[in-house]
Image: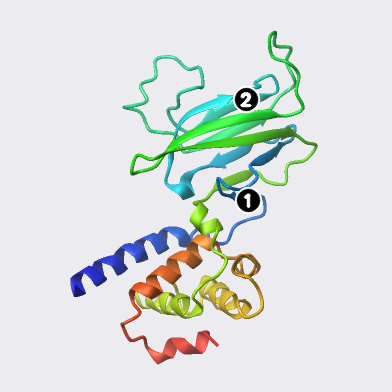
């Protein structure tokens, strides 16, 4: 049992480490889940990236219903792009789509519409398939250059066990994944402080950390609930 707890904690720490770098999200990056309104504005001269990396899913196939004013590309092998001589079983799978607006073309058989629909079929590591339906709108400006698709469970994280997050933070500091008093640690501490007066998603956004990181810290803290933590870390959790 002790070995299992140690192994579980190590896995969670590795997952946490993978989240630390992108935690402070720059302007222009928006997170959406499959259950959200998947509407994306596309402006002239600026492309939009749609990344499925946070979900761990790979893109299997796409259908762009109106290609008269949009181009579509991907970072890997993908069925539906019209390319020939591709063996998607042997090439790197796609995880990011790139959409770019072009001058509208006159394409016989395609009626003019105010928006286009993009259908994306993905597959998870366990083999489960999902379909995402995006609505693409022409716009004068695009507020986001990157759309990150995140797991639905993360988007539904409305409440959090603050004590577990504190324990997870302490464990991450002890393991060297987070620098005590560093920039990320300060953001986590601010998040914990904001929880007293704000909903979890609002507090996370205000503090500059992602809900994925909050969920990982909570999970790490829950797995280490029976383990003592040094009192020295408590000064950052007031």
Residue 178 position (above or below residue 110): below
Residue 48 position (above or below residue 229): above
Q: Quadrant of residue 220?
A: bottom left
Residue 136 visible in the current orientation: yes
Q: Residues within 10 Å of mark 2 (few under 14, many from 20)?
A: some
Q: Residue at x 58, y 74 (%)?
A: 191
Q: Quadrant of residue 68?
A: top right
Locate residue 89, reporting x and y percent. Answer: 33, 27
First in sequence, mark 2 or 1: give its number: 1
Extreme residue in the right direction: 140
**Separation of marks 2 and 1 at Cα, in angstroms:** 21 Å
Residue 206 position (above or below residue 28): below
Locate residue 1, reporting x and y percent. Answer: 19, 73
Give the residue pinned by disc 1: 30
Mark 2–mark 1 CB contact (< 8 Å):
no
Q: Residue at x 36, y 78 (%)?
A: 174
Q: Viewer-proximal residue, 23 or 121?
A: 121
Q: Secondary structure at mark 2?
A: strand
Q: Residues within 10 Å of mark 1 (few under 14, many from 20)?
A: some
Residue 22 visible in the current orientation: no
Q: Residue at x 73, y 34 (%)?
A: 137
User: Which label number is shown at residue 104?
Assistant: none
**In this rendering, would 219 be left or right of 2?**
right
Q: Secondary structure at mark 1?
A: strand
Locate residue 11, reporting x and y percent. Answer: 31, 62
**In this rendering, would 10 be left or right of 25?**
left
**In this rendering, would 201 be left or right of 225?**
right
User: Quadrant location of the C terminus?
Assistant: bottom right
Give the residue pinned by disc 2: 71
């Amino acid at each position: 049992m002790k070995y299992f707890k140690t192994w579980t904690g190590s896995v969670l720490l590795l997952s946490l480490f993978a989240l630390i770098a992108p935690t402070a999200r720059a302007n222009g990056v928006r997170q959406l889940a499959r259950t959200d309104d998947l509407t994306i504005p596309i402006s002239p001269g600026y492309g939009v990236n749609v990344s499925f990396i946070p979900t761990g899913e790979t893109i299997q196939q796409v259908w762009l219903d109106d290609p008269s004013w949009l181009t579509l590309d991907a970072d890997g092998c993908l069925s539906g792009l019209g390319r020939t001589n591709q063996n998607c079983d042997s090439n790197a799978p796609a995880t990011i789509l790139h959409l770019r607006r072009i001058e509208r073309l006159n394409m016989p058989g395609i009626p003019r519409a105010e928006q286009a629909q993009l259908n994306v079929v993905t597959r998870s590591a366990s083999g489960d398939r999902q379909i995402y339906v995006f609505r693409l709108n022409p716009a004068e400006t695009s507020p986001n250059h990157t759309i990150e698709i995140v797991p639905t469970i993360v988007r539904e994280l409305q409440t959090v066990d603050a004590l577990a997050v504190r324990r997870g933070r302490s464990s991450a500091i002890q393991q060297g994944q987070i620098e005590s008093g560093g920039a990320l640690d300060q953001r986590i501490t601010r998040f914990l402080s904001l929880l007293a007066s704000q909903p979890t998603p609002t507090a996370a956004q205000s503090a500059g950390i992602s809900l994925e990181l909050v969920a990982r810290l909570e999970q790490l803290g829950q797995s280490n609930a029976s383990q003592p933590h040094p009192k020295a870390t408590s000064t950052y959790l007031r």
